[in-house]
Image (tube, grey):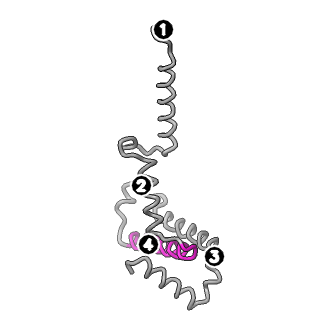
Amino acid sequence: MQDLNQLQAYLRQFAKDRDWDQFHSPKNLSMALSVEVSELLENFQWLTEEQSHTLDQQQRAAVADEIADVQMYLARLADKLDINIGEAIEQKINKNEAKYPAELVKGSSKKYTEYVKEEQQKEQQESQKDETPAGKKG
């Protein structure tokens, strides 16, 4: 099932057929999502970086199952809250482009707030230079 709307419709019907919609509140779905993400993480626990890149067939199948669970809960949660995932992703990409301009962050893993602090410090230093009286050595 490649289409997200089709997946959401399927999951909606799946829950309805089993009378599970009563349990699918946003709170419960987000809690279940957290559990599934933890199960995904469990597949990588104690692996080295290299091992995490070279999973065997059984490990890959287990990871694929958990990724599917995570995606299904995300799709169901978005459906219950009437959030268009495609639009939400597009908006978030635009925010990330603004927060992490490539020319400023390339090759760094710092959080955007650290870049903001650095820029503010630079601006403050520049303004202090401008305030130094001409001819006076500091």
Q: Nearer the viewer, residue 18 or 82?
A: 82
Q: CA distance from mark 1 to mark 2?
A: 57 Å
Please name the residue shown 51% across and 28% down the image: 124
Quarter holding the N terminus?
Answer: bottom left
The amino acid on which the numbered mark 3 sits, given as a three-letter code, is Ser
Which span of residues is magenta-colored? 58-82
Please name the residue shown 45% across and 80% down the image: 7
Compared with 111, 86 (above or below) is below
Q: Which residue is mark 4?
A: 62
Tell me the SS state at disc 1.
Answer: loop
User: CB under 8 Å between callouts 1 and 3?
Assistant: no
Q: Main secondary structure of the magenta part?
A: helix
- The mark found on residue 48 in the picture is 2
Is 36 situated left or right of 59 in this image? Answer: right
Decide: few, some or many residues near mark 2? Use Cα within 10 Å; few <14, some 14-19, many ≥20.
Answer: few
Q: Nearer the viewer, mark 1 or mark 2?
A: 1
Tell me the SS state at disc 4.
Answer: helix
Q: Which residue is mark 1?
A: 136
Furthest-bottom residue in view?
17
Q: Nearer the viewer, residue 91 or 110?
A: 91
